[in-house]
Amino acid sequence: MVTTVDGSESGSGAPEASALPDLLVAAIALVRDRRVLMVTAREREVHYMPGGKIDPGETAAEAAAREAREEVSLELDPVELDELFEVVTQAHGEPDGRMVRMRVFLTRTDASPRASAEVGALHWVTTAELDRCPPAGAEVLRRLAASGLID
């Protein structure tokens, strides 16, 4: 059984014939001054964690480092990323029942993030911006706050 963000349980782990496959993603949590870095895509209002899908043959940490480079111009060593937790929830903008499994990695760097061509803006956020986030991002903010990392 897998327990989702809302506390419900989803099956035995065996895929159902009609079930959509989960989206496997990795994201970084860059925390500074009790805020975490989030991004908005061009022409969008929703705040996302910097991250994306895990490619075949890639570890979650490798995907998180690659996405950090692609989205916020940060060069990170996957070996130095600390996995914090995995969020499992309804995928934003996907059909009901399509789940996202987001593995979140704590990132430590003094480098300055910069928005890439696919990112419209960078935001340093707290739980005050929960309403600006899709379900997975909101859950990440809640967990970071519960861990004492952000306000």
Image: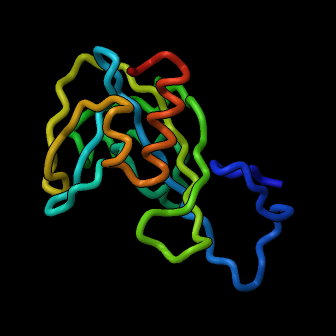
Left or right, residue 8 beside residue 72: right
Where residue 95 sits: x, y (%)?
52, 77
Task: Look at 13% across and 55% down and name the residue there.
Answer: 117
Count of picture labels: 0
Task: Look at 35% across and 27% down and name the residue there.
Answer: 30
Residue at the extreme bottom of the image, as rendered: 18
Task: Look at 38% across and 41% down and name the residue there.
Answer: 130
Where residue 59 sits: x, y (%)?
55, 46
Compared with residue 43, is residue 133 higher up or lower down, i.e. above or below? above
Which quarter of the rendered picture does the C terminus lie within?
top left
Where residue 11 sits: x, y (%)?
82, 64
Which quarter of the rendered picture does the N terminus lie within?
bottom right
Compared with residue 100, is residue 50 higher up or lower down, i.e. above or below? above
Quadrant housing residue 124? top left
Left or right, residue 86 beside residue 126: right
Quadrant housing residue 64? top left
Observer-nearest of 149 and 82: 149
Where residue 139 sits: x, y (%)?
51, 42
Judging from the image, the colouring scheme is: rainbow
Observer-nearest of 131 and 52: 131
